[in-house]
Image: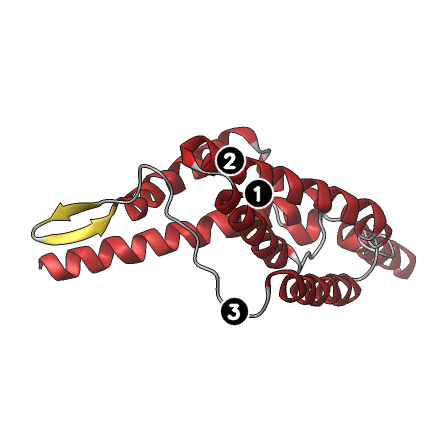
Amino acid sequence: MAFYFVQFLTGLASAASLFLVASGLSIIFGVTRIVNFAHGAFYMLGAYVAFTLTERFSGAIGFWGGIVAAALIVAVIGVLVEMVLLRRIYHAPELFQLLATFGLTLMVEDMVVLIWGPSDLLGRRAPGFKGAVDFFGQNIPSYDLFLIVLGPLVLGALWAVVPANALGRSGSCRDARPRHGGGPRRQSKMAVYQRVRGRGISR
């Protein structure tokens, strides 16, 4: 039972890590109403930038400062991409948005390989999370426990701060997003109006 319990906590930590990435994608789609396929590429870019900064600066302050600086750098790059590319395709069909952001993903991947190389890079553990906690004779990394706690906290913060329609809690993103040609809501209203009008004329 101890082995299965540890495996359950490990899977829960992996799920929390995936949730933190997916929550950013949900916010992007909910706020901008655009299919941003390059979200994962920017996450990867932030990881490589954070690796470079945390390896250059030593100590706990240098590590966490490098993490914050990497997030700010990627945020600035994201703002530039939004101004140059995404702002021009807000009202384009979803397939066009997908192709444009997929091309951006390929560009980011090539840039990462050009700068950091194709080999895997292993960064140092976060200060304060290098140890493990003993559960019934099984060791669980303290960083996994941190992710398990952080996931629900981020979920609660998003639920309290971000508007409901941005996270898809009310209605659907497909109905809320302005579409090319009038949008689903407008088309549905026009269809109802035409049916009602047709019945009136037939009478």
Q: Which mark is first along the chain, 3 or 2?
A: 3
In 3D space, how far apart are the residues under numbered discs 1 and 2 (Cα atoms)? 8 Å
Question: Would you call the spot at circle 2 few (<14 residues within 10 Å), some (14-19), or many (20 or more)?
Answer: some
Q: Is residue 171 above or below residue 99?
A: above
> Is 194 placed left or right of 66 in the picture?
right
Which color mode does the image show?
Answer: secondary structure
The residue at which mark 1 appears reads as: 167
The residue at which mark 3 appears reads as: 119
The residue at which mark 2 appears reads as: 158
Q: Count the marks.
A: 3
Residue 73: x, y in percent?
A: 66, 41
> Which residue does the image show at 87% across and 59% down from the upper left?
198
**In this view of the protein, can residue 192 be seen by the observer?**
no
Which mark is in front, 1 or 2? Answer: 2
Q: Which mark is first along the chain, 2 or 1?
A: 2
> Which residue does the image show at 71% across and 66% down from the upper left?
102
Which mark is in front, 1 or 3? Answer: 3
Q: In terms of secondary structure, where does tag 3 sit?
A: loop
Question: Would you call the spot at circle 1 few (<14 residues within 10 Å), some (14-19), or many (20 or more)?
Answer: many
